[in-house]
Image: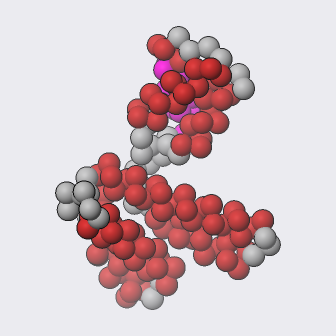
Amino acid sequence: MGVLSNLSEEIKNAMLAKDSVKLESLRAIKSAVLLAETSSGSSGKLSDQEAIKLLQRLVKQRKDSASIFKEQNRLDLAEPEEAQAKVISAFLPAQLSNEEIESAITVIIETTGANGMKDMGKVMGITSKKLEGKADGKRISDIVKKKLGA
C-alpha cells in the first residue's frame, strides 16, 4: 500500500501542527481505508489501485459537496470541503494534463476506428482503463465528447 504508506506519520504531523483541516482529511482517508479493508469480500489489504480509486472517490465527494455549497451561497461550508479535497489529492499520483489526455484519446480513437458519438462507450471503456488513477473520469469524458464531435 505504497500510496498510503505514510498516512499515520502525516496524521501525527497534522496533530503536532494543530492543522485541523489536514487532520480531518487524513482521518477521513484512514476511516475509508479501514472500512474498505474490513468490508466483506476484501482481502484485508488494499492494493495501490484500490487505494487510488478510494482516494479519487473521496476527492470527488468533497468537490461535489463544495460545488453544491457554492450554488447555495454557503462559502463557509464550501471552503473546508475544497481544502480537504486538496489534502486528499496530495496522496494521489500526479494527474495528466489535458494535452496528455487528448493525445492518449486520439491514439485510442485511431486504433479502435471510432467515429461519432455511437462509439463513445467503446472509447470511454478503453480510455478509463488506460488512464485509471491518472485522470478524472469527467475530464476524460469531456475530452472524448469533444474528439468524437458531440
Is 41 situated left or right of 120 in this image?
left
The quarter of the picture where residue 92 lies is bottom left
Which color scheme does this rendered protein use? secondary structure
Q: The N terminus is located in which quarter?
A: bottom left
Residue drawn where x is 53% and y is 70% of the image: 84
Q: Which residue is at the far front? A: 40
Instruction: Point out the stretch of residues depicted in magenta.
Output: 97-108
Query: Magenta stretch containing residue 107, yes or no?
Result: yes
Q: The C terminus is located in which quarter?
A: top right
| Residue 103 visible at all | no
Q: Is residue 4 depicted above or below 16 in this figure?
A: above
Q: Is residue 87 depicted above or below 130 in this figure?
A: below
Residue drawn where x is 43% and y is 73% of the image: 28
| Residue 134 visible at all | yes
User: How far across and down, in percent of the image, does residue 46 sit?
Assistant: 26, 57
Residue drawn where x is 75% and y is 76% of the image: 74
User: How far across and down, in percent of the image, does residue 112 sit?
Assistant: 48, 14
Q: Which residue is at the far top? A: 113
Is 32 situated left or right of 86 in this image?
left
Residue drawn where x is 51% and y is 79% of the image: 21
Is 114 situated left or right of 71 in this image?
left
The quarter of the picture where residue 83 lies is bottom right
